[in-house]
Amino acid sequence: MNPGVHDMLAAWGPQAGHVAWLWNIFLAICTVVFLAVLAALVLALRRAPRIDAPAPPDLSTVNVPEPRLRRSVTMAVAITIVGLLVLLAASVFTDRALARLPLRDAVNIRVTGHQWWWTVTYVDGPVSETFETANEIHVPVGRPVVVQLHASDVIHSLWIPSLTGKRDLIPGRSATLAFRADQPGIYRGQCAEFCGFQHAFMAFEVHAETAENFARWRQLQLAPAAEPAGAQAQRGKQLFQSIQCAMCHAIQGTLAQGKAGPDLTHLASRRTIGAGTLPNDAAHLASWIADPQRHKPGVNMPANPMSGADLAAIVSYLGSLK
Amino acid sequence: MRQGPLGEQPHPHKGRTKDGLAGGELVARVLDATWADPPGLWGWFCAINHKAIGRRFLVTCLVFFALGGLLAATMRMQLSRPGNTLVGPDLYNQIFTMHGSTMMFLFAVPVMQALAIYLVPLMLGARATAFPRMTAYSYWIFLFGGLMLYAAFLVNSAPDAGWFSYVPLAGPAYGAGKRNDIWAQMITFTEVSALLDAVIIICTVFKMRAPGMTLNRIPLYVWAMLVVAFMIMFAMPAVALASAMLIMDRLVATHFFNPGEGGDVLLWQHLFWFFGHPEVYLIFIPGLGFMSAMIPTFARRPMFGYTAMVLSIIATGFLSFGLWVHHMFATNVPELGKTFFTAASMLIAIPTAVQIYCWIATLWTGRLNFKVPLYYVLSFFVILVIGGLTGLMLASVSLDSQVHDSYFVVAHLHYVLLGGAVFPLFGALYYWYPKFVGRLMSERLGRWSFWLMFVGFNVAFFPMHLLGMNGMPRRVYTYPAEMGWGTMNLVATIGAVTLALGIFLTLVNALRSARHGVLAGPDPWGAGTLEWATASPPRPSNFLATPIVYGRDPLWQGIPEGQPDHVSGLAADVREVLCTTVADAQADSRMMYPASTPMPFLAALATTIFFVGSIFTPWAVVWGAVLVAVPLVWWFWPTQGEAQEELALEKLDASLAAEKP
Amino acid sequence: MNEAVVRGRALDVAELPTVVFSHRSLMWWGTLGLMAIEGFVFALVIASYFYLRSHQETWPLTALPPDLLWGTINTGVMLASFLPAHLAKRAGERMDLPGVRLWLVASVLFGIAFTVIRGFEFATLNVRWDSNAYGSVVWLLLGLHTTHIVTDLLDTIVLTVLFFTGPLDGKRYVDVSENSFYWYFVVGTWLPIYFVIYWGARVV
Amino acid sequence: MSARLACVLLAASALAACEREERHFSAEVQNATGGATAVRRSSNQPGMALGGLVKLADRNISMYDDNAYAIGEGKRLFRWYNCSGCHANGGGGIGPALMDSQWTYGSDPHSLFDTIMQGRPNGMPSFGGHIPEDQVWKIVAYVRSMGGAVRSDVAPSRADSLYPGKPENFRSPQPAIQQGVSQSEQPLSPLR
């Protein structure tokens, strides 16, 4: 499965772009400094005569000033300071540029971090217009996105290398992060603050789409779950609402209203399950439901021992939730 | 001869034999007998001689270094290929927490203090550290703290929330069991030890320098350790306090970090990084000290720009307290504040640059005696400089927002800490080994070890910069194959193995050379500072007669015509030392030192019971305090004999003597 | 008399004093070091107090401010205890045994007095350490200072007993001086702590 | 002799520590009768009602009494499954309190397990089939900790939330709570 773009230098939005620009400046200046120091060192080593036994020390410099050396060192320090000022200026300039992202007609999203997955809530418009999904953020290309960051348990950190730098989600604090995607595509994001057993598999995806695709997706998400066609899927729905599934998961338009786990109303429309752990297809879904601990040890979803028929039924039901 | 206030009689004969070169071999033997720790196993527990303690301290730290290294190797094995299942997430979290905590709290800072405990008195021409029993106590407490941590690891109770123990993950709600209480208490142990050693080093440097060693003649290494000691006094309390708050939150339900009850999780980060950032410089500045000690010796000339060097070290010490927020750029602290911390973080590059240029200038105008220590010194210029430059990148708020908490940071911090501290430390071990052991280490093995370490290090850590920029976060126990991080991780693992091999070679070298090394003699490198003026290894009293100093490199600059060259008149049959004035080190007073005693060991044992007990019940604070008080009072209480010896040596100040007949 | 004299190539220090006070004594520097550390811990706790306070609209959260009575009385008693401490120090530096004994005993009595009053202070804080963050930080602050009081009280008691039983020598007078020096510190640090605990919860 | 005793004690404490700190990810614990044998005592069920019988505890052992992580999980599930909705934080409300000494249906492990699985008349829903039994055992252990029935070095401390009174690790054992048998006393407990 192609994981999506995840490289801070492969910048596909203005925020990551500014930082990539800053990176190049830092890289250039630092490389020059590094080479200069090495050159000075190598020259010093080539120039200074070798001796192997500890010869008597050269005391000619005791209490005698060394004007030439002092001049060179002072010069080097002066150059260093200038270099640092340039870096500082570039850095501050970039900070300002990042802060200046125009936010007119922004898409407002609330992202809540959990151990080890993400709730994504689209909060624009009246309550009837808001909806919730998980581990997959869809954004329209060219429109700014303002993300309100919350944490439900421990500290997490939202990072989408190709779109924007990271920002922590801190319990008891609120923060926002603004970015824009300028090219359609799939960008991988990941939790960047150590948050327990499955910090490693706490990923998500940003799907940047054209305005109309985004609108279509949005309409789809607003709708309640489709009524499954076919006996097996029907039975799957019954099972889902009666056994443990419904205790944690919600499927809008059914009796399943659990709030502890990801909302599954449109599960089949997502690319991954388990917060980027597995691709979302029938086989993986079945094996995930049967025993998530095999794929993501420590995850809060328990193993669900059940007959093959039941499992198949539930999988086919979930598969129908486009 | 004076009488005691309660009619105590002065000791009949003690204190008659005085030291000084005039006394010859006889006095030398008396001095050895006086200053030697008692023999045998019991004597081992009574030892308070700073060389014995320093040697043990050093070895203990190196053992912890090896353990931390093994943990690192395990992590590299686990990460060598995607989806590896060598260790699961639970164990991995314990391992990387143990690795970080071990390296930071049980190796990097203590090893520097251990060397200082051994070297500083020798470099100052003193007979011992100030407060020798406290020196021993701080070693024992450190040892027991480390043992507790590893004992916990063996019974699956190792901390698992990272060496930074961020709440709430490490707090009561998400850190089940005792794992993070163990961490918090390990902090208490190591902080007590570090703080006591800091006070000891400061007092030794201020009051116990050889006559004539004015402030502007103190060796640069000692200056570095002095600054470090001051930094410890103001950095370590922060983490000690934070860990106390943490353990109280976990055990007695206080709410310091509970947002639900008015607490704040960022309070932890502020307190922790107020310690955590200076911590980096606590590790790095002694490295600078090693550089400044070795470069003049191997360039065969005095250090260029002594004053600039001293001022730079002090400046670094001060500035290091103004940077902590750059570890919190990803949190929602005010933007303006962030800019300030960016500026401060860049500012601190200047004093380091000054020192680097002064060293290059010294090498430039010197004649090079190319021995293994110099190799390690030179590697500093490659590795540390790279680490410092990536540090500038992390100092920039916006750049940090990308690389923060990614593998880029892992690469950066290892470039700084290994380049700035471990490589110079290895140089220092090769440099001072003959002083500890009396024999030189093998040059050939040394060069092999160096090149393996140097190449291995860069192969292991350079790729991590790229991994970080490619989106690989820190502290992950594995990663999916499709991320394409596999190859570079494999390379890093190969590098790590090479590095480990190089370190192992140095170990072999040290063990072999202890037997078969070339005899060193007092001054094998022809160095200029006082530790080389005495035998290798030094006699129990360090110096038969305290030297007198007339320059920055006493052994090079010698004694001016007609000036005295040593101190005489201190008791040889009683542990008597000379105290000098703080600024210009004039002989000022005499002081009697205590005899070797097991009290430090017993007190440390009691303290350990206290600390470990309080992990399980708050009441341990009460009965533990009583338990600790007993050996401490015993420790303080003078015996009849001590009082008599005191009186035998006692002289009052002129003013007092006037009114006391 | 009693300074180092040059004899040939040697600097003879046999005549230097062994009993020296304040900045001439190693002890003084050691005590100063510990004071710096502990003082900084107090400073950090106070900083934490105001940090937590700065993130709240209401302070002291849901609790009532502590009653002023006992805390203020204790402040008075502590300030008064400067005197015996100071006189003990002076007597020590004059090596005057009766004086030392008298003022050490006085200091011990004062120490006991405000350890007892401290008990009442805890009782009238009007908050528990586990009620909320305010309670936690106030208990921590008061608890830390109490630890210092108790330790120094024990030191003083031990020293007093020693001065009645012996064995004594000149160096012990230096201990008296240092003990009082540390006492100054404990009392000195109390003043800011008093204002934080008792007025930090009142003054907005 | 004393040395051997010391070794035994050390080993014992080490084992205790090991079990306290274990993180059991997958439910290798089966401590309920193989087939469902008991009727539900409550018509009230979460989600869509399940027909059929429920399982009962087959041993009077509280599986997780010595495991801090599992009890912590129990505490989380107690919130997730909204037990606190009726029992508050053990203080009681719509449902009875769980930290006092009145236990209508018995407070030993198997009674607690059965109460959760079968439900009880007038209110307590029957969770059999709605919660995996391994999780039920975790909740059982947590409920026991509310009454101070588990070791204080294992019981959870305060939550990161509003202060709900004494944390579990400070509760003194309620006289009426039968201690039952905790699995570390089982030579061949199913956890090993």
Image (cartoon, rainbow, N blue to C red):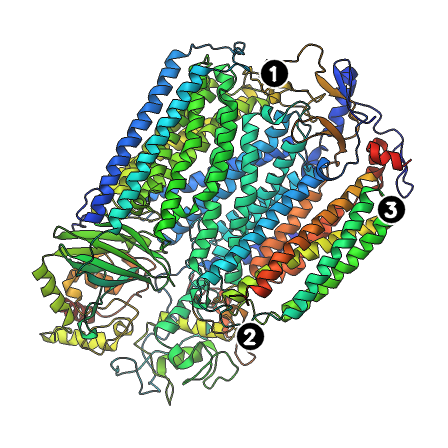
Within the image, what quadrant is residue B411 found in?
top left
> What's under tag 1, amino acid-wise?
Leu
Q: Is residue A158 left or right of residue B426?
A: left
- Quick check: can you spot residue A258? yes
Distance CA(mark 2)–CA(mark 3) = 57 Å
Residue B652 visible, this orientation? no
Q: Quadrant of the C terminus of chain A?
A: bottom left
Give the labeled residue for mark 3: C97
Residue B21 lies, in percent from the top left, at: 75, 16
Circle 3: element type = helix
Helix, strand or loop at mark 2: loop
Q: Is residue B324 above or below residue B569?
A: below
Parent chain of label 1: B
| Residue identified by numbered label 1 | B555
Residue D77: image quadrant is: bottom left
Residue kind at label 3, given as amino acid type: Leu
At which x and y percent is residue C71?
Answer: 66, 66
Could you say where residue B537 lies in the image, as x and y percent from the top left? 62, 23
At horizontal 61% and vertical 57% (from top left) the residue drawn is C192
Residue kind at label 2, given as amino acid type:
Pro
C157 left or right of B381?
right
Badge 3 and badge 1 in a common chain? no
Label 1's element? helix
Question: Which residue corresponds to mark 2?
Answer: D173
Give above or below for A50 relative to B435. Answer: above
The residue drawn where x is 55% and y is 33% is: B225
Spatial separation of the CA atoms under disc 1 and disc 2: 73 Å
Q: Quadrant of residue A288?
A: bottom left
